[in-house]
Amino acid sequence: MIKRICLQESGFTERVYVDKEEMRLDLCSFHEPDWTGTEINSNGTEVDKDIFTLTFQEICEHGDWSYEKLLEEATS
């Protein structure tokens, strides 16, 4: 499990996710409305880049997020 940390100190509440992929998808959804990323396609043309293609690290850097890995409690 991992905990989301907002590095902007903008008042976001901390949230715990099952894994990095769950956090990545949530952050992509959060940033999608204001996303303006582009990339160069195989024809050399600049095109819109789908925010959901960003890696975990890329979306964290885009929104100034970090995370803390939580120790899972042992179950008996």
Image: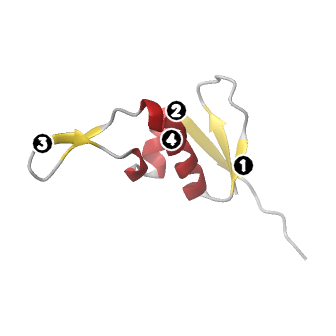
Tell me the kind of residue under disc 2.
Answer: Asp
Q: Position of residue 42 (x, y in %)?
A: 13, 53
Residue at image coords 53%, 51%: 25
Q: Nearer the viewer, mark 3 or mark 2?
A: 3
In front: label 1 or label 3: 3
Q: Residue 32 versus residue 13: which sits nearer the camera? A: 32
| Residue 1 as seen in the image, left or right of residue 60 | right
Which is more foreground, mark 3 or mark 4?
Answer: 3
**Quadrant of the snapshot with the N terminus:** bottom right
Q: How is the image coloured?
A: secondary structure
Q: Residue 51: where, in percent of width, then height?
A: 40, 44
Residue type of the residue flagged with mark 3: Thr
Q: Earlier in the sequence, mark 3 or mark 2?
A: 3
Give the residue at x 52% y 32%: 64
User: Which circle marks residue 64 in the picture?
Assistant: 2
Label 4: state its secondary structure.
helix
Upstream in sequence: badge 3 or badge 4: 3
Mark number, residue 60: 4
Q: Are marks 3 and 4 in contact (CB under 8 Å)?
A: no
Badge 2, how many Cα within 10 Å: few under 14, some, many 20+? few
Choose the circle earlier in sequence order: 1 or 2.
1
> Decide: marks 1, 2 in contact (CB < 8 A)?
no
Amino acid on which disc 1 is placed: Val
Q: Which residue is mark 1?
A: 16
Q: Residue furthest right?
A: 76
Tag 2's secondary structure?
loop
Mark 1–mark 2 distance (CA, rounded to whole Å):
17 Å
Say the numbered circle drawn on residue 45.
Answer: 3
C-alpha span from label 3 to label 2 = 29 Å
- Residue at image position (21%, 41%) is 47
